[in-house]
Amino acid sequence: MPLLSIVVPFLDERESAPAFAGFLKRLTLELRDRFGLDTEIVLVDDGSTDDSVARYASLIEGNWKIAELSRNFGKEIALFAGLELAAGDYVMMMDADLQHPYDTCIKLVSGLLGDPELDVVYSVRDDRVRESPSKAVGSRFFFWLINFRQRFIVPANAGDFRIMRRPVVDAFLKVRDKHRFNKGLYAWAGFRQKGIHYIPDERANGVSKWSGLALLSLSLEGVTSFSALPLRVVSFCGAMAGLLGMIYGIKIIFEVVFDGIRVPGYPSLMVAVLVLGGLNLVLLGLLGEYLWVNTGETKDRPLYLIRKLHQSSDRT
Ligand code: UDP
Ligand code: MG
């Protein structure tokens, strides 16, 4: 039987562990009966401080692994760790908080198995209507920015919740970026992909681990690893400011030489100093962002460290 690995990163999900274990049990049975698939569950503990690991280890049935990372590395890296451990011919990634509906899981699987030409079926969340207008505008602007004149388009709202064939997983594992912006990497990888829409369920317990600030930082990661547009815009502004300054300077010289007008100095100087100084600082900060990403990438550190690997075969 072909093997499907279900990769799930989690951080402090003790409350939803029993429900999620039930969810996986039901899914595993349906996958076997309806699609003839064997299932392997690969959980990645992204530095939980509660007893999630012990709970999962006692609750989950069948063939499973739990990789305990040495600390919190972030969901994107945790997913990568899960992909490295997954042995399946197909790999599905999903969250542990029961926000990913059962039916959508089935749709992902049947979508991929039903079309041999497809390599990836990904999910697109359709709940942006619930979002605040400012967040929606921010998200639009972000996707416009990273997709501006690119050879590959990053679809908005397409998430990690997806299923891929083995060759795609292997390709993805070759990307060793440390600052990982998964949405961008999926698009960058190419392959034949299809999206299906879904509306996520409410979180079963707890709150989302994405604060506004974390989202902002992830967006910045997306921009610095996929777009040079901000740099170019600032360079363009700099060039324009220089050009305008030159024109203004020539005008002043003419006025002084031919009309004998005395130029009022202070206000014009102040404006020039502030505008150019501001631009300079913005560009410096931006350069710093790109450099920071670059520094991280050049250090030859492993992406993650595993403290302990638990397996269903240990529990006999
Ligand atoms: N998660 C993780 N590491 C983190 C943050 C979150 O592994 O640093 C897990 C979390 O336990 C959940 C999934 O990633 O299984 C999605 O997280 P969350 O529900 O907080 O995000 P949202 O659904 O709001 O995108
Ligand atoms: Mg969630």
Image (spheres, rainbow, N blue to C red):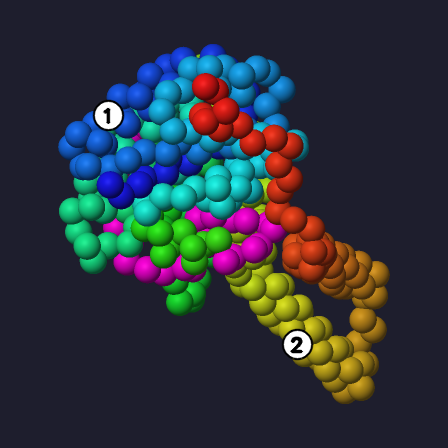
Name the residue: 17% across, 51% down: 115
* Left or right: 266 in relation to 179: right
The residue stretch that appears in magenta: 174-201
| Nearer to us: label 1 or label 2 | 1
* On screen, residue 293 above or below 46: below
Is residue 166 or residue 218 the one in the foreground? 166
Separation of residues labelled 1 and 2 (CA atoms): 69 Å
In terms of image quadrants, where is residue 125?
top left
What percent of the width, then of the height, locates residue 275?
72, 59
As helix, strand or loop, the secondary structure at mark 2 comes to helix
What percent of the width, then of the height, locates residue 260?
81, 81
* On screen, residue 182 above or below 287: above
Residue 238 is a magenta residue? no
Question: Can you tell me whether the CB of the residue at mark 2 lies under 8 Å from the nearest atom of ligand 1?
Answer: no
Disc 1 marks a residue whose amino acid type is Leu
In terms of image quadrants, where is residue 133?
top left
* On screen, residue 214 above or below 180: above
Instruction: Give the residue number, with chain letter if any, for mark 1.
Output: 29
* Visible residue check, residue 247: yes
What percent of the width, then of the height, locates residue 191?
32, 60
Instruction: Give the residue number, with chain letter if any, for mark 2.
Output: 243
Dot 2 crowding, Cα within 10 Å, few <14, some 14–19, many 20+: few
* Visible residue check, residue 8: no
Name the residue: 50% across, 24% down: 314
The first of marks 1 and 2 along the sequence is 1
Q: Quadrant of the N terminus?
A: top left
What percent of the width, then of the height, locates residue 96?
43, 25
Residue 175 is a magenta residue? yes
Q: Quadrant of the C terminus?
A: top left
Name the residue: 53% across, 38% down: 78
Name the residue: 38% across, 29% down: 63
Disc 2 marks a residue whose amino acid type is Leu
